[in-house]
Image: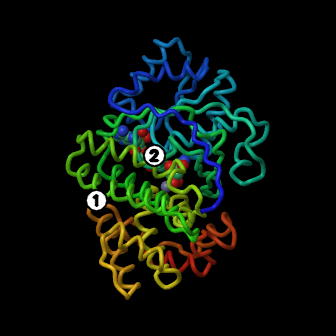
């Protein structure tokens, strides 16, 4: 196991009716004026936004609003938010929504106290040394942004989707998580969230770091919990227990717990971010296409951990024939994704003839000549993986 520092100061307030505590929590963290950030309207339709506003008013907290964040959030909304925050003298961001809303709030939080262009942080031209506090009322278990220090934004000019990681400053100070708020999720969004949280675990699980039994077992156990609860939640969208377990799995998958002491991979995410940027696909659906393809490529290049995964997560019987064990594990993963309504090929994603040269060019321009860690992928390798997903 590698040396590590794990700092995860987020206060999670979890359970039925938790959102009524939002105003009190904002006050506890010392804010005077918050900017409430939300998406395309689901929180208006289901009454959550009104409930959050009431809670802020009762706590005597002033606020302004920034709605209309789109899935695969874009830089233009961030600029709008930075300007409004400065004008309104906001001192805390309150994201009410999913990953796209939270990531926009984080980008604004970093951008407000910075003299230059906030995009500098995403392209590595500058580092975040100061940020507004970020708080969250979560509506979809998926991206794990409620517990992570990450934000992912797409620059509209050039369609560049990049992530920024600042655990010390951009991890939310608190996250309100009421599983009942996820009852209104369309089945496809629920399924995409499931694929994303599984991917967050697998990006950490596929590591070359040795003696990481605790990490391996946390990953395997959380994956097993997700697979079990996924079947229930797809049949019974209002099953509280299943929604609650999935919601916490989504946080555990990405707040760092599963990966401490490991060299993590993240190639599948970077391969997918290009698909989201260029074809505007839903992140989780892009992952259900690309992760099995990445694993399939690994069978011929570095099979060991794929075999362990197939046996421990998918219950494939042990055998001398490592490759067949690995292939069976991948085939069970694909069958699972299909069973919850997710695509496993580009064609099923609605992209008949993806421009693979463009995807590869953009990936290596953004992430360097070698991508990932389990096996460091060259341009030729990433092209082969995209082709395996056709
Ligand atoms: O916009 P509204 O109307 O709110 O609808 C949203 C949106 O259409 C809807 N939704 C959310 N909660 C709902 C609901 N509909 C009904 N009832 C509810 N309770 O779901 C749709 C998707 O929302 P979005 O926020 O985009 O989903 P998600 O949480 O999956 O976030 C995806 C984004 O996060 C990034 C992805 O790349 C993508 O841009 N990621 C962020 C990470 C991070 N910050 O750590 C890590 C991830 O790997 C990921 O890359
Ligand atoms: Zn993800």
Q: Residue at x 58, y 37 (%)?
A: 9
Estimate the x, y position of residue 101 in percent, counting from the top left: 51, 40
On the image, which quarter does residue 377 sit in?
bottom right
- N-terminal label among 1 and 2: 2
Q: Residue at x 57, y 32 (%)?
A: 173
Q: Is residue 258 above or below residue 115?
A: below
Residue 72 in sight from this viewpoint? no
Task: Describe residue 189's horizontal placement relative to residue 119 as left or right.
Answer: left
Q: Which residue position is annotated with label 1? A: 340
Q: Which residue position is annotated with label 2? A: 251
Estimate the x, y position of residue 48 in percent, counting from the top left: 38, 28
Q: Residue at x 58, y 62 (%)?
A: 262
Q: Is residue 389 above or below residue 16?
A: below
Q: Residue at x 69, y 68 (%)?
A: 368
Of residues 258 and 362, the one drawn nearer to the viewer in this rendering: 258
Q: Is residue 288 above or below residue 258?
A: below
């Amino acid at each position: 196991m590698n040396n590590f520092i794990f700092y995860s100061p987020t206060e999670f307030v979890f359970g039925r009716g938790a959102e009524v505590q939002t105003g009190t929590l904002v006050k506890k963290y010392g804010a005077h004026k918050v900017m409430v950030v939300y998406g395309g309207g689901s929180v208006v339709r289901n009454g959550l936004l009104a409930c959050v506003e009431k809670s802020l008013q009762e706590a005597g907290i002033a606020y302004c609003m920034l709605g209309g964040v789109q899935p695969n959030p874009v830089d233009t909304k961030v600029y709008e938010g930075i300007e409004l925050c400065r004008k309104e003298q906001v001192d805390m961001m309150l994201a009410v929504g999913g990953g796209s809303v939270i990531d926009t709030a984080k980008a604004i939080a970093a951008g407000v106290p910075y003299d230059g262009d906030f995009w500098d942080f995403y392209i590595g031209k500058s580092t975040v040394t100061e940020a507004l506090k970020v708080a969250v009322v979560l509506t979809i278990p998926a991206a794990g942004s409620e517990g992570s220090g990450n934000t992912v934004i797409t620059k509209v000019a050039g369609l560049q989707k990049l992530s920024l990681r600042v655990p010390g400053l951009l991890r939310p100070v608190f996250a309100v998580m009421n599983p009942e708020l996820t009852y209104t999720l369309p089945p496809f969004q629920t399924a995409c969230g499931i694929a994303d949280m599984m991917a967050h675990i697998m990006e950490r699980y596929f590591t070359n770091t040795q003696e990481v039994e605790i990490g391996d077992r946390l990953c395997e156990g959380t994956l097993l919990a997700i697979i079990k609860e996924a079947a229930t939640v797809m049949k019974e969208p209002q099953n509280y227990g299943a929604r609650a377990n999935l919601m916490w799995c989504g946080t555990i998958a990405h707040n760092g717990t599963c990966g401490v002491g490991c060299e993590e991979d993240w190639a599948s995410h970077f391969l997918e971010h290009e698909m989201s940027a260029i074809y505007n696909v839903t992140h989780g659906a892009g992952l259900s296409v690309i992760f099995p393809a990445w694993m399939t490529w690994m069978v011929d290049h570095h099979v060991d951990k794929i075999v362990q995964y197939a046996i421990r997560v998918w219950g494939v019987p042990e055998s001398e024939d490592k490759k067949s064990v690995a292939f069976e594990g991948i085939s069970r993963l694909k069958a699972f994704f299909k069973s919850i309504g997710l695509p496993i090929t580009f064609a099923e994603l609605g992209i008949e003839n993806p421009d693979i040269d463009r995807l590869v060019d953009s990936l290596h321009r953004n992430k360097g000549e070698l991508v990932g860690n389990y096996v460091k992928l060259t341009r030729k390798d990433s092209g082969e993986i995209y082709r395996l997903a056709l």
